[in-house]
Amino acid sequence: MNGPRSTDRSRLRANPLYDAGAAKVTVFATVLIVFSIILTGVIAYYITKGQSVKKLKETDLEYIGGSIASKIDGRIERAMETARLLAGNRDLNEWILGGERLGGEETVALETIRRMTEQFQYDNSFIVSVLTGQYWTEQGQLLDTMTGSDPDDAWFFRTLEDGRPVQLDIDYNEERKDTFIFVNALMRHNGVPVSVVGIGLSLQDMSQQFGEYKYGLHGNLWLTDKSGEIYLSDEFAQNGHNMRDYMPTESADRLLSMMDRERAVTEYVDADGNRKDVMLFPIASSEWSLVVAVDRNEAISFLKTIQWQTAAAVAISLLTVVFFFTYMSRKLADPYKRAIELNEELERQIATRTKELAEQNEKILDSLDYASRIQVSALPTDAELKEALPGHFILWKPRDRVGGDFYWLKRVKRGHLIAVGDCTGHGVPGALMSIMTVSLLDQLVHSDSDDPAAILTRLNRSIKQTLNQNGKEGLTDDGLDIGLCLLTDTATVFAGAGCSLLVRTPDGLEEYEGDRKSVGYRKTPPDYPYTNKVVEVGPDAVHYLTTDGLADQNGGDKNYSYGKTRWKMWVAANGDAPFDRQRTMLEAEIDRYRGDEPQRDDITVLGFLPPRKG
């Protein structure tokens, strides 16, 4: 017997899959990992359970109850408002005072009640005359006559005695064979009540709708008063009972004692041993409160998934660890070592390459900073702008460190030329175009050449010649949109190419649109005649020139472009603020609107008050 067994052991040890050391490591690692998974699962379960219960009490119940309470409150408020409208209806008032006659024009008064009942989908409505005691339905039927001896009519006399304009009452209507929430309103004539008019909401129908808001199968929704009487429940059979019939008296008393608070949370264990979390919400339009009860086991039922997942993880780990350690111990020792050496070599190469890229990036950033200084030096200084325009602000926000937007200022014989332009491209290409355009403007304009339209025509021809864009073929097709103003002592002369001038006066806003053809592009003829628009406004007319970067900036709730309409609305609302304040507010408006969205284009906005004599 010993011989065959010894031979089997020797065969197993000779098998390359068998290694006593690897087997011990595998067993130890398996036990350790399985224990860790079980421990982690248990800890995660109880932490998640605690946080889930906390979230249920502090967030979920408040959200559920608040939503339901707002819907109930809204429906009651709407019914109260309808009752007020009926109580103030002149035709109904005259019909009551006229003796409640039917036929002819008198019937129109009752038609008002029927129409509003159908329009707002109420269950019923009514009007009861104080003078005759007659109870009329929304269908124009005389349903009853109020008498002090009939207990079912006590609500009518309570309403008159109370004297409040609108009152809520829950009552069983014998004639209609249903229980209703009635919204009663007093109709007065010269301060004296002449009738009670109201709206009826079926309690049975509301219970069915109430059930749609219910959380889980074993939760509860109750509309109660301070005594705990249930006026409305998701289960119609519970209407008219008391909370103490469905929850421990001690818990009910504790909850009712907190009804004067804005909202309250408690918990209790029901007769079946299920723990329920309860939140109380006051209904603002009435003296009632909404009670939301949620079965805790239903609310955190998802935690069972954690238990199953933990068990599955343990089983998978057992199989995976055995295979993994056996394979690693026998097959992957040398490849693993080679992989480590290869990884170290790759890390060295990556570190070297990263250093080279960092150095190159630093050089590029230094170049961009220098390009930015060059571009800024080509723009008018603050002192030059302040001398030409004592009242102004400029918002210049390139998308990158440099950009294609620019603003330009030149003194001429009749005053000053001022422009805002948007060249093709962003970054360095756009900056090169803007610097070239500013240089061409400085060359083309002298003291006697102050006609904006003629200047744009010459600028168009110069750019096309400079970039060799007169023909249909070429390496580039670049140009710009520009708005150019001549500011004199008496008027503003504006010419635009794809840009507009917005003028704000005490009488409102007026937009002066430029020509549609942009400057310099191949499709723009070399001798394209741009046109002038003369703006003759008073000394308090604020001018605005802007590139399309502002209107094209996306953002907002629906990620739409900012647009010209929203820009005009901003100018209309804020154009009378001091200029430095306008700049701050506009920059904040752009940041607010785009939110987390990146800046899409270069943005330039120039607002100014043209100098006028007198």
Image (cartoon, helix red, strand yellow):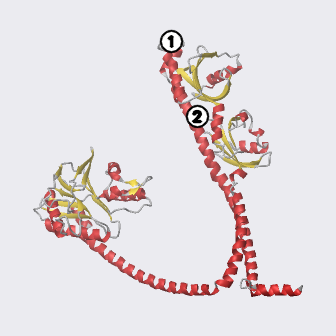
The residue shown at (73%, 75%) is 30
User: Which x, y percent locates residue 563?
Assistant: 34, 52
Question: Looking at the image, which is closer to me, 78 or 380?
Answer: 78
User: Which x, y percent locates residue 146?
Assistant: 64, 16
Element type where label 1 sits in the image: loop
- Report the residue marked by disc 2: 76
| Type of amino acid under label 1 | Gly
User: Which x, y percent locates residue 422?
Assistant: 27, 62
Measure the alpha-carbon separation of dots 1 and 2: 33 Å
- Report the residue marked by disc 1: 103
Q: Residue furthest left?
A: 448
Of pointers 1 and 2, the one earlier in the residue sequence: 2
**Looking at the image, residue 447 lies above or below residue 88:** below
Q: Is residue 284 visible?
A: no
How packed is label 2: few (under 14 Cα within 10 Å), some, or many (20 or more)?
many
Q: Which mark is residue 446?
A: none
The answer to which image quadrant residue 525 occupies is bottom left
| Type of amino acid under label 2 | Ile
